[in-house]
Image (tube, grey):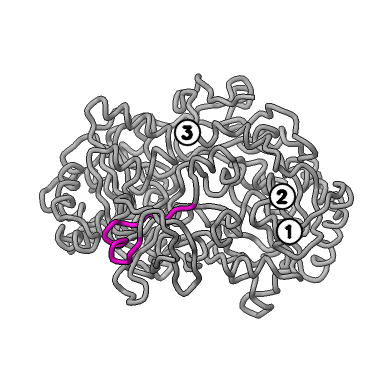
Amino acid sequence: MKVQGNPAHPQTGGVLCAKVSRYPERTYDPSRVLQPLKRTGPKGSGQFAPVGWDEALDDIAARLAAIAAREPQAIVPYSYAGTMGLVQAESIAARFFHQLGASLLDRTICSSAGTEALVHTLGGKVGMKVEFFAQSRLIVIWGSNSITSNLHFWRIAQEAKRNGAKLVCIDPRRTDTAQKCHEHIQLLPGTDAALALAVMHELIVNDWLDHDYIAQHTLGWEGLRERALRWTPERAAETCGVPVEQVRSLARDYGTTKPAAIRLNYGMQRVRGGANAVRAVACLPALTGAWRHRAGGVLLSSSGMFPVDKAALQRPDLLAGRTPRTINMVTIGDDLLRPTSPSFGPRIEALVVYNSNPVAVAPESGKVVAGFAREDLFTVVLEHFRTDTADYADYILPATTQLEHWDVHLSYGHTDVLLNRPAIEPVGQARPNTQVFRELASRMGFTDPCFADDDLALCRTAYGDQVDFGELLAKGFATLEIPDAPFAEGRFPTPSGKCEFFSERVARMGLDGLPDYLPNYEAPGTSAHYPLAMISPPARNFLNSSFVNVPSLREAEREPLLEIHPQDAAARGIANGAVVRVFNDRGEYLVKAEVSDRARAGVVNGLGVWWRKFGLAGTNVNQLTSQKLTDLGRGPVFYDCLVEVQPV
């Protein structure tokens, strides 16, 4: 079998990244779970025996019903975007947990800080159309390793480069993308807002401003102007750890090149002040009037442009007035270990995991493992493989891959709705998530007709009459009708209709309504014991933890690595290829060192996210990350982490 992109789709042009091109290898991997499994040994031992679907579902339904009879909030769903689709993610599953009255899950582990930042600045996850980056004269790639994580955008950026555009990469790591741009600004983790404010400073003092656009289409200019004038290039250079000439050059390029475009990504928001940083960068196009040009503006995610009818898919009305507590998926390590209390509510007694691998991907994984290892915790995992999380399950239920089920998608990068049509029958006894939750609903006596909706009907429900489903069936994609330059005349989807430099909604939360620089919780130079900052960007051949077990991709990555600058390695007596101990107060991680200028001095790069079972000592980089949350959006701070490194 071969999988390839659709050559008729303009934004992707039939091109697949290295990961997805190996999807058949993943689908037919001999280690795939193809029948339900029941635990027979201690949690974490990976000891299971095959069982029939009926036996498994009968027992799961009985166990959940018994808990729900006492306290439904003791049951927690844990899921994210493992399948990336709207139907196999939160449709029947959401209906099931709403009907049950289970705890809600705050799904924040990836993008919530950036989402909140855009909501309170631009009005939502909206921005310029990706295809018009090809016409930009300056592209600032900020917090994104596009070659690894956004290959289709990189194709467009390369077209712009061939047409004479300048490409600037802003990233603490010297990534493949940074190496291929004209300039790389290798700032310290978590200092992006300081750099953005210094760019504003230079736009103001040099009068590289579009005064008419500011007057007509922005809110809070005077306050932002006053704040930005405090951030001289010298101050920002010291804060960011970069030459002052780079700060001035970036501002000059941005202020004098038209059209100028910024491609943001999620790396910069995974620190304490991540949302403030995104807010600061998102203000820049309105200062220069870049939005007037279809090839100007900013794009973090286009997903807010899609008219998804989440209420119809997820049916929150099934809660029938109940208001269950909300568990943040980032703090699952702490939450699984909490006893019943008035502030927290009931102790978590059951966890149903789908589309996620929390034991590998959640922060401070020592606590996550301890929580999942509780013998009194009933855990069900819907999965393709025996992941780190599946090892702690009471039942593993075989799930379908994207080649085997119906689904419908939105996009983070372009503005086309995509149909996921099954290409093959489910392998073995695998079943779609939707089918599993339908059958559990039936066994638990849920009679609402919505539980009978089939997957094709759910695909139609996702967009209602906002998208021509016939076009989706015929072409596989349907393009949303969005203006080429959506904010050329303002009309942002904010309460004021303007780009909100000052957000009244943020101020009402008791926070600063203007974007500002917030130092990391664990800022470099603040700890005598842990002098190195650590970020944990994704390895090139992995997508979070989803492709770690694909043999060809794992062989390409070879082994877990920690990139360390030659200066830091020499000071610690660390040779290239040596096993090192990376540690802080939360734990330790054994890994091979790669001495490389991909890491800047004072910062180490722990490439992830490897499954723990493939680590040298059965751990991964998340042994060291913390459960603290971002300034807005309650997101994780994976890149806000201090460590020390020693040779073993």
- Label 2 element class: strand
Closer to viewer: mark 3 or mark 1: 1
Q: In the image, which residues are magenta?
A: 560-574
In the rendering, at what x and y percent does residue 111 appear? 48, 52
Q: Earlier in the sequence, mark 2 or mark 3?
A: 2
Amino acid type at circle 2 is Leu
Residue furthest bottom as drawn:
342
In the rendering, at what x and y percent does residue 588 appear? 49, 68
Q: Which residue in the protein does label 2 denote? A: 382
Closer to viewer: mark 2 or mark 3: 2
Q: Is residue 593 visible?
A: yes
Q: Earlier in the sequence, mark 3 or mark 1?
A: 1
Which numbered tag is attached to residue 393?
A: 1
> Is residue 563 on the magenta stretch?
yes
Cα distance between the residues tagged 1 and 2: 10 Å
Q: Residue at x 70, y 42 (%)?
A: 32
Quarter in which the C terminus is drawn: bottom left
Tell me if mark 2 has few (under 14), some (14-19) or many (20+) residues whose alpha carbon lies within 10 angstroms of its own. many
